Amino acid sequence: MLDYHRFYLDNGLEVIVHEDHSSKIAVFNLLYKVGSRFEERGKTGLAHFFEHLMFGSSANVPVFDRELERVGGSCNAFTSPDITNYYMTLPASNIETAFWLESDRMLQLTLSEKTIETQRKVVMEEFKQRYLNQPYGDVWHHMRGLAFETHPYQWPTIGKDLSDIEGYTREDVWDFYKKNYHPGNAILVVAGDVTKTQIELLSNKWFGPIRAQATKHVSIPKEQPQWAKKTKEVAAKVPTDALYKTYKMPEKGAPGYLEADLISDLMGFGKSSLLEQRLVKNGKIFASVGAYITGSVDPGLLVFSGKMEQGISAKAAEKALDEVIEEFLSREITELSLQKIKNQGEAMKTYENVQLLNRAMNLAYYAHLGDPGLYWQEFEDKSKLTAQEIKTWANQLLKEDQSSVLYYQSN
């Protein structure tokens, strides 16, 4: 269990302090409750685009990175479908610099025409290099669009199309900033060689004066139940065929979510997994294969994916995959295999918690879900699941009429 102190400023900012005096380092993690699922058609990718804009200048900070580097710090950020997260690591003695930098860009970011156009070029180039000009780069553009028909999970965080990024107006950008970048829509976690009294004082000093703003709740279209298998064929200049088969699964925190997570682990985690043994080691169809979940705030996907051996089609590979899924559904899950996966999960969690940054990020993310303590509660709940509970959910989730399949074919 992680020790933490949690409080709120009058303007709505949630602040969490995690003290760790084992080193002289501090982490400053600011999560904004906005990601690509809050976007609308025609203006997709704005959350990610804005992540780039935040590293420009603000009223009192000409160059964000330079000011942080002067005090021995480093920073980065990421955007997901559900959140945007900014983080800094720096000597704990200089933690006030982080408060100054982050509060200044929350309150008064400089969104000049030059900054917007510079970052537009950067993001468009990223879109081309990572998604259009890289083998298999556009897989999730196709896969998300196939699996989701109404929910905004149907596009990646980078955006649905280049034309969306090209079309952002200055008004779009300002409107996004005003709607989402304010205290009531953020969670701050400060971890490391700090004290709760110190962080309370600094939070009130630097963020307290920022005016409260009503959070406008966006109505997100709900994905309707899927009753029939969906397929899509894509041909591209890639070395071999690839297969992506997904099944709808519950959202994080809902019944069935942890079971789906364990199903993916039991079938696809490590070299001794069922998929690896049947389809790669003892087969001649898959060159690589795996299983994972998207782990999203709204109902997401349980994913099976792999690349084929030379000359093998994705459709032939699907038949082999289906046979392994049927094998998994028809046999009992042994206590030995289940305990092995649980032990691996515990080892990963222990390793993950060695890093101060990981602890800060997890506290922020689970606070976003409603309670920082959910991080450990989820782990404990997962460790208690029985083989029968997992099997019941496997039979409920791994149904052909709830699948979406992308055949990514080489030409």
Image (tube, rainbow, N blue to C red):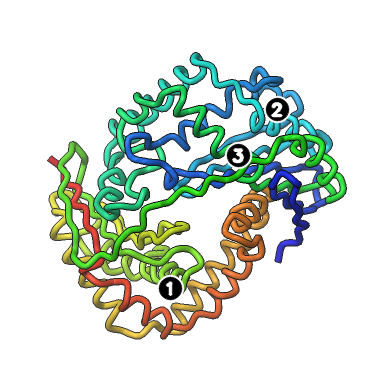
Q: Which secondary structure lies at badge 3?
A: strand
User: Nearest the camera: 282 or 291?
Assistant: 291
Specify the amino acid type for callout 1. Answer: Gly
| Residue 244 locus on image (x, y percent) | 26, 55
| Amino acid marked by disc 3 | Tyr
Query: Where in the figure is residue 130, as x and y percent of width and height?
Result: 36, 34
Q: Are marks 3 and 2 in contact (CB under 8 Å)?
A: no
Rendered-image quadrant of the N terminus: bottom right
Most foreground residue, 27 or 168: 168
- Where is residue 320 drawn, in percent x and y? 19, 66
Q: Nearer the viewer, mark 3 or mark 2?
A: 3
- Say above or below: 205 vs 401: above
Mark number, residue 86: 3
Return the disc, 3 or 1, that comes first in the chain's sequence. Answer: 3
Q: Are marks 3 and 1 in contact (CB under 8 Å)?
A: no
User: Disc 2 on helix, strand or loop?
Assistant: helix
Residue beneath the point at 50% across and 34% down: 176
Whether residue 287 is visible, yes or no, is no
Give the quarter of the image for residue 259.
bottom left
Residue at 22% across / 64% down in the picture? 283
